[in-house]
Image: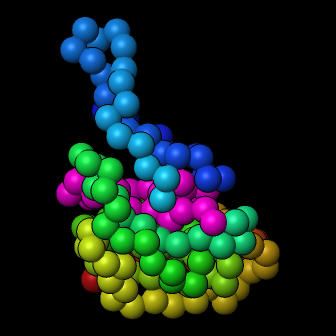
Amino acid sequence: EIFITRGYKSPSVMLQMEADGKSVSEKWIDTTLDCHHHGVVLIDGTIYGSNWITNGKGNWCSLNWNTGKIGYETNWFNKGAIISADNKLFCYEEKSGNVALVKPDPSKFDVISFFKINKGTGMYWSHPYIYKGKLFVRHGNFLMCYNISK
């Protein structure tokens, strides 16, 4: 199976390989989680990400991998990039630079804590990166590093 999403109100689709290994079919189609350019994360059968409403607005969503059923669509500041480590989500919203630690829950956007990136200029469009227990977040010419191993 492969999940494809591309933003701008384009439906996302779950494709599955047919038994003959030569063709694919649509398993389901979704019109809510049309991820703009921020990526998605799969944890325990749930896809997490943000959708595109306009170029300047979007919500955070969860979607069941097997059925395509939406678990939630929630406004939290704005859409943004997402990454996962140690069964936690790190969400970096693109408009004001808030970074949230989120407990993966298919039914709600459960923010444990958050902080704001306060260095750099421009939109907050970079994708966070995790390496050896450190969360790296770039904004403009600044690269911040946070210890998330504790």
Q: Is residue 26 above or below residue 32?
A: above
| Residue 49 located within the stretch drawn in magenta | yes
> How far across and how far down the image is residue 79, in percent?
58, 71
Of 143 and 105, which appears nearest the observer? Answer: 105
Of 17 and 26, which appears nearest the observer? Answer: 26
Quarter of the image for residue 61 reads: bottom left
Of 149 and 77, which appears nearest the observer? Answer: 77
For residue 39, say whether it is visible. no
Position of residue 107 in the picture relative to residue 141 (left or right) = left
> How far across and how far down the image is residue 47, in percent?
34, 56
Position of residue 125 in the picture relative to residue 101 (left or right) = right
Q: Which residues are magenta?
A: 33-53
Residue at x 48%, y 57% (from the top left corner): 33
| The furthest residue to the right | 122
| Residue 21 located within the stretch drawn in magenta | no
Quarter of the image for residue 85 reads: bottom left
Q: Quadrant of the C terminus?
A: bottom left
Residue at x 30%, y 22% (from the top left corner): 17
Q: Quadrant of the N terminus?
A: top left
